[in-house]
Image (cartoon, rainbow, N blue to C red):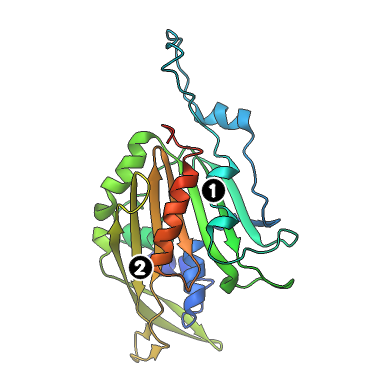
Amino acid sequence: MRDDPTLVEQIHNELRDVRWPAPEEIRSRARRRTQRRIVVATAVLTLAGASAVAVAAPRQSPAPALPAASASPTRHEITTDALLQPADLPQPVADPMYPWQLSQSGLGEPVLLDPLLGACRTSQGRSEGWQPSILSRSQTLLRKHPPGPRTDGDDLVAQDLYRLTPEAATQLFAGLDDLIAPCAEWRSVGPLDTAGVVTTVEVVHRWAVTQRGFAGDDAAILRTSLTAAKDVKSGQVHGDDPPPILLAIVRVGDTVSVLRLGYDGTEAELRQLSVAAAARMCAAANPAC
């Protein structure tokens, strides 16, 4: 294990693919996971049921059988019908014959809210604070688009759906204010390459929970505000302040969804999709809806 990186190295690593003046690129870097790959628009990678159960289900010693009337099956795998569907979105989704959906399934991944929030916390000697999951499924639905290169503007919504232990699922919401408290206002410093000229710039990030309790068993909207990059030496500001980055966190039973809209999404749209996501999550939640 290498030594902990410096603050500048952390910011450089997190934002190395971002050119500061472009708000849509800052938003895209925060919401994409590096291991996603492109698949057919409606196809979602599937966890093998037997493998998922073998990894996720705890071993139990034999116990007396419950009466049939009170027995309820425990769900393990997250199936595709637990995710948002094209019909839930207000805009047309890309034609399934073109590769316009990003998708991934995983085991034991952390419930990642915002990579920069994690960088803020670790820069202060804290843990990232992410709750561990048992298994997860992710997708990004893209707007209808003619064949050709995909752009960040094609993103409609990115969704990460996790199964956690019941305790971890409820603790995620109970500890949300404590999670962001050290990062109410965070000054990050890193390099900016402008036409081959590298300067050191600073950006101020602010995190806040703006809404709660509007979907499922629990829900919250996390808003990230950023200032435009400012040259540390000259004070020159590069561009305007980018629009805020919005994400919703929704819990139904032991499942949690993290939803991120495209760069032009609003809080009202995010709330609407959160309600739709909560209804879909009933297909995977324990206890059942």
Do we see residue 1 in this rendering? no
Residue at 42% from the left image edge and 12% from the top image edge: 66
Assign the C terminus to one quadrant of the image: top left
1 or 2: tag closer to the N-terminus: 1
Q: Quadrant of residue 133?
A: top left
Where is 53 relative to 116, above or below?
A: above
Q: Give percent across and percent down for residue 36.
A: 60, 55
Q: Give percent across and percent down for residue 92.
A: 61, 65
Where is 253 relative to 44, above or below?
A: above
Residue 224 image label: 2
Residue at 72% from the left image edge and 73% from the top image edge: 146
Q: How crowded is the residue under tag 1: few (<14 C-alpha within 10 Å), some, or many (20+)? A: many
Mark 1 or mark 2, whichever is nearer to me: 1
Q: Amino acid at mark 2?
A: Thr
Q: Amino acid at mark 1?
A: Leu
- Residue behind mark 1: 83
In the rendered structure, the answer to whether residue 265 lies left or right of residue 53 reads: left
Q: How crowded is the residue under tag 2: few (<14 C-alpha within 10 Å), some, or many (20+)? A: many
